[in-house]
Each structure stands twice: as C-alpha cells, then as structure tokens.
Image (cartoon, rainbow, N blue to C red):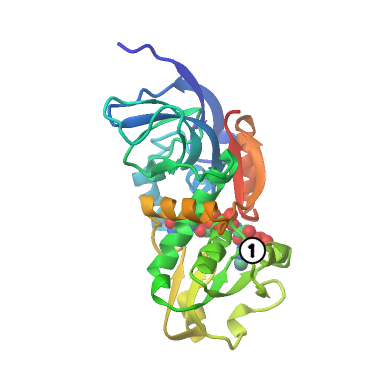
Amino acid sequence: MFKQIPMKAVICTQYGTPEVLQIQEVSKPIPKDNQILVKIVAAAVNSGDVRVRSLDVKGFEKVIMRLVLGISKPRKPILGTVFSGVVETVGNNVSRFKAGDKVFGMTGFNFGTHAEYIAVNQNGTVMEMPENATYEEAAAIIFGGQTAIHFLEKAKIAEKLNPKILIIGATGSVGTAAIQIANYYKGDITAVCSSEGYKLVNELGVTNVILYDKDDFTKQTEKFDIIFDAVGTSSKKQCENLLNKNGIYTSVSSGYASENIQQLQLLKELFEKEEFKAVIDRTFQMDEIIKAHQYVDTGRKKGNVVLRISE
Ligand SMILES: NC(=O)c1ccc[n+]([C@@H]2O[C@H](COP(=O)([O-])OP(=O)(O)OC[C@H]3O[C@@H](n4cnc5c(N)ncnc54)[C@H](OP(=O)(O)O)[C@@H]3O)[C@@H](O)[C@H]2O)c1
C-alpha cells in the first residue's frame, strides 16, 4: 500500500459564482507506469475554466455540459487545463522524460492543473518547455495558442499565400494568439477590438484596426480570405459579404478546439524563435483563485491570466 501524501488543490465544490472554489487538501497523485508526476509551478485561469465553473451556457447546451462534466457539480473537481512545472518522478515505463525536466502541457477535459501536482501520460499533450520561457510564460501561451492554431488550421491558413485575415475579438487569450499565428503564416491582418485594446494589438504588429466601439466592422468594403471570430460575437451570415470568393469564416462558437502535441510543438518553436510572445494581463497566487476567476469572469481580460501555484 502506498502512503497517501496530501497536496493542495482548488476544488470546484459546485457550479456557481467564483466563491464555490475552495482550496482543500487532497491526495497527491501517484504516477502510473506510463505517467510522469509534475510539480506544477504555474497554470492559467482561462475562459474555459470559468465557463465550466459557472455553467454559463443556455438551453440544450447546458444539458449536454451537465452530462459531460457532471450533473450537479464537476465530476473532476480540480479545474484548470494548462500547466508548466518540473517533473518530480516518472513511472516505470517512462522513457520520454526524467526527473528535473521542465515541462508544459494541456489536459483538456481531464482538467486538474489548479493543484500542486498532476500525473500525466508521457504520450499526452506534454513536452519540454520553450528554453527561453519562464514558467508563467509557458503556462500563458498554451490555451489561446492551441485554440487559435485549431481554428486557423480549420480555415486552411497554411494553403493560402499571404492571406487577408480579419480577426474579430483580437485582445483575448485566443485573439492575441490568433494575431501571432496569422503573423507566422504571413497573413495580412485586420483586427477588431475595443479602443482599450488598440495599444495591445498594435504592439503585436497589427496596424489595420477597427474599433468596435466606434465603427461597425461589417460595414467596411475590404474582403478577406479568412474571417476568424476569436470571441464568438458574430454570425457567419453577418460576415458573408466580407469574404472573398472561397473565403472561409470560422468562429470559436463552432465546435471544440481539440488539443494535440503538434500545436504545443509549434508554440514551443515559435516562442523559442521569439515569433510568439506570452501576453499576460495579471498573475494571481493560488490562494487568490476566487479573485482570478472574478477577473476572468469580466470577459475583458487582455491576453491571459496566470495562476502561480508554487515557487
Ligand atoms: N470552441 C472552443 O474550443 C473554444 C476554446 C477557447 C475559447 N473559446 C471561447 O472563445 C471565447 C474567447 O476566449 P478567450 O479565452 O480569448 O476569452 P478572453 O481572454 O476572456 O477574452 C475576451 C476578450 O474579448 C474582448 N471582447 C469582448 N467583447 C468583444 C466584442 N464584442 N468584440 C471584440 N472583442 C471583444 C475583450 O476586450 P474588450 O472588452 O476590451 O473588447 C477581451 O479582451 C470565449 O467565449 C471562449 O469560451 C472556445
């Protein structure tokens, strides 16, 4: 019998406001033969985490979410889908990692990263961190980066030469990553954001900016090869007139951005080449988890919110 060792974790005790989150002691995981045990240094609090916590969806989607996540509270009570940290121990069959490796990764619907430790499969979405990244930066680039890569690949970005791209909602976690992924594909970008977000998108290299609090982006005459709604506020119908022939509209509202190791690899490479940077709005300590969720709940964060788990 293994001795149970306690660790701290943020437990989502039920669906609701940020106050449903509590720091509790739970058993530190013991890695299985093909797993690595990671001491988490940083995670992020993302729009996905607050959506699960609040179950803020309407109608039939709410029923589906309860079936998938848990009827009255999350079946997996430790939220958080991204992490960076240090490998503490490895299972008997692990060959890809060793104790001491600095790693970052994503757990998707397995959640579990708002905790001091996590055991993940060595063949999961986990790899060595970008060499030049801090733990905060490594944790911050994953969620938006992975989502942006998924939707821009869905829009066949790699098949187009210097595509003209409209990014709606360019200042969130997904939007700031989408700008950088579009830059990597030599896209000619127009960004839609608020006046408050102008400086940030400009710093990310975008000069064509439509401020949604001043202008209606649907009224412009420009046409695009790709329209990516990174915030999910538009409809395809509303944007149809803005598409070139064979142009593609895609939105975060259409489907789930599944994660894979290739996305993580691309983010690592771009970060190491300084072609992708971590946009961090605020950093909270683990015991400030309620404040962190309250801030993400506003829907107004710029880039990412990091959760510092350990030193
Ligand atoms: N389908 C998927 O798998 C998937 C994956 C990830 C995320 N998502 C969804 O994608 C959305 C964005 O996620 P996120 O993590 O990037 O969110 P986020 O970081 O919370 O970003 C919200 C950003 O959008 C801006 N914004 C708000 N309303 C806007 C509007 N009408 N037009 C343009 N910009 C607006 C906000 O700035 P201002 O208030 O200053 O404008 C803020 O910077 C969320 O709804 C999330 O649930 C879906």
* Neighbourhood count class around disc 1 (C-alpha, 10 Å): few under 14, some 14–19, many 20 upward: some
Which residue does the numbered mark 1 point to in the structure image?
A: 204
Evaluate whether residue 242 shows in this view: yes
Q: Residue at x 37, y 11 (%)?
A: 3
Quadrant for the C terminus, please: top right
Q: Is residue 3 left or right of residue 114?
A: left
The image position of residue 78, as x and y in percent, is: 46, 34
Evaluate whether residue 58 shows in this view: no
Q: Residue at x 50, y 38 (%)?
A: 84
128 shown above or below 176? above
Residue 255's image quarter?
bottom left
Q: Residue at x 31, y 26 (%)?
A: 91
The image position of residue 30, as x and y in percent, is: 36, 22
- SS for callout 1: loop
Residue 286's image quarter?
top right
61 shown above or below 240? above
Q: Is residue 282 left or right of residue 248?
A: right
Asked if disc 1 is less than 8 Å from ligand 1, the answer is: no
Q: Residue at x 35, y 45 (%)?
A: 68
Indicate the amino acid at tag 1.
Leu
The image position of residue 260, as x and y in percent, is: 36, 51
Q: Quadrant of ligand 1?
A: bottom right
157 shown above or below 80? below
Q: Is residue 208 left or right of residue 160?
A: right
Please tell me which residue lies in front, 273 or 143: 273
Please tell me which residue lies in front, 109 or 311: 311
Please tell me which residue lies in front, 294 or 179: 179
The image position of residue 35, as x and y in percent, is: 33, 31
Q: Is residue 72 left or right of residue 189?
A: left
